[in-house]
Amino acid sequence: MARNRDNSAPYETATARLLEIALILLVFFVEGGAPVPHNNEAHYLAKAKHYWNPDWCAGDLFLESADPHLFFYWTVGLLTKWFSLPTVAWLGRIVAWMSLAWAWQRLSWQIVPVKYLSVVTAMLLVTLIAWGNFAGEWVVGGVEGKCFAYVFVFWGLAELARGNWRQVWPLLGIASAWHVLVGGWSVLAALAVWGIEDKESRPSFYAMLPTLILGGLLALPGVIPGLMLSIDVPDNVKAEANQIYVFERLPHHLAPLTLPVAELLLRTWRFGLLLAMFLWLWRACGRLPSRSLLQLVRVQRFAGACVVFGALGLAWEVATWNHFALSASLLKFYWFRMADIAVPLAISLSAAWLFSMVAHRRSHAVVLAGIFAIVVPAALLLNLSINRGLDNTAPSDSKLSDRFAWQEACGWAKENTPKDTLFLIPRHGQSFKCYAGRPDYFNWKDVPQDPASIVEWFRRNREIYSHTNEWGKQVSYRSLGELGTDRIREIASQHGIDFIIANEYPPLGLPVVFENDWFKIYRSTTKGSSPPPEEAGSITTQ
């Protein structure tokens, strides 16, 4: 049945297809084209650069922790040996977005072979993900491993829709090599689709076994580094690290029920609206028998399986509510990730398929629905582009007081300190290594992946930003300046920290070697810098 549908699909010329891909690429550029570094680019690319050049930012806890994304380091990360991090970021983005555009056009055309409709489905995809995600997942943004993983997920879904099961598993295996969780959850969802399908229209498990094994072998570059993270680690350290990772650092991705009530309600009603839309479209499409329906239904079942995974994750979180170690042991696997993508994906393709089936009626409702599906996402993307033009701040710098002042301070550090100089930086200064090329003692974004390093990372967080007040309660500092000179000097002395970058106010009683309107750099040791302190102190920005 799937083969007949594919053979009878309208022919698309190479020129038309390339134009569609180019337009989808434009959509992805608008969606993800924020300045470098994006949120995870500072994280991924710095790790990749250090992997190939261990002397770069030597002494940084995050960079010297375990390396879980080896496939990314050996591909995109290899470029850091020859190009600057911003150049690698843009090269990686362009290749990732082009690949995603190609894969999405292939998937969309497989479901709805109507010229240029894949551009509309691409707009719907990115805007629905951005607006309605439940656990903060995304596809198009800065370059990292999961961008390429989704290329092979989309490609694999196109083959799944055709019923070409023997090609699905190797493709999802490659997705797992790029990102083991994106690929792994996709494999489970695809297996669920295969299990539900009538035996007459699917191959047997044994017939698929060779390609399943091939997919497993292709996944090993992603699976093995993940398994290596916890080898020979004591159980108590694993349990502590899991709880830190799930409940302290990433509850917005991994433990949504622990979020503030207002945020949880906002996420729930938005994703709930998407879920209702998905279920309605699934039912509406099912009422229009067509030879092409089975292909769409397979994709819908894939999305449905991802929703079930998310529901199981919520059930587990509730069932283990007061058993944090047990709860975190499974929640760390990102149960909600794939539903954030699969539901908008299924909505986009289902809406396009339904529209193609009823477009000949040309009723007012059909025309309005078509206009709405184009105008609303286009307006949202236009608004995003306008806002980015008004405030062109890199996402990694979005929580800092002033990006230009921050980059200037980082530039001073790069030009005036030895390469092994250790800095204490603001909590959200994750782009420091990218700009300054110097190690930092702690920042909130750069959480390691191996248990021992996670525990040490969180110890540093508490050491710097938590203290016991006069009533015996644990309270948090909001900035380094609030710690006071004595505490900063004590931390710097204990850990060999040479310089401190802090907000301009409140000031610290340490020698100032650089300042502008927003940041000051203080010397905490006698470690040399050029120019000397008396000259450096005059480098200010008014």
Image (cartoon, rainbow, N blue to C red):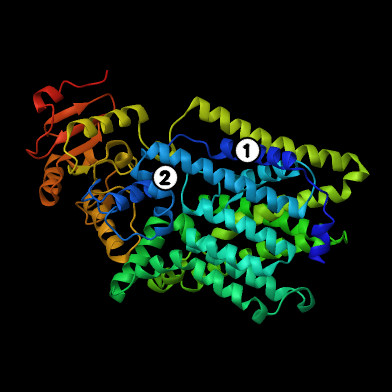
Give the residue furthest to the top.
542
The reply, left or right, for residue 289 in relation to residue 245 is right
Tags 1 and 2 touching, CB below 8 Å = no
Amino acid at pointer 1: Val
Mark 2 packing: few (<14 Cα in 10 Å), some, or many (20+)? many
The reply, left or right, for residue 537 in relation to residue 147 is left
Badge 2 marks a residue whose secondary structure is: helix
Residue at point 78% right, 42% down? 115
Q: Residue 527 at what x, y percent from top left?
A: 9, 39
Which mark, residue 208? none
Residue at point 57% right, 37% down? 29
Residue 366 found in image quarter: top right
Residue 265 visible in image = yes
Badge 1 marks a residue whose secondary structure is: helix
- In the rendered view, would you say 221 is above or below 515? below
Amino acid at pointer 2: Glu
Q: Residue 160 at what x, y percent from top left?
A: 69, 64
Q: Which residue is mark 2?
A: 41
Relative to the observer, which residue lies in front, 534 or 161? Answer: 161
Relative to the observer, which residue lies in front, 354 or 529? Answer: 529
Q: Residue 246 at what x, y percent from top left?
A: 41, 62
Q: CA distance from mark 1 to mark 2?
A: 20 Å
Residue 69 visible in image = no
Which mark, residue 27? 1
Q: Residue 93 at what x, y percent from top left?
A: 50, 42
Residue at point 63% right, 63% down? 307
* Number of marks present in the image shown: 2
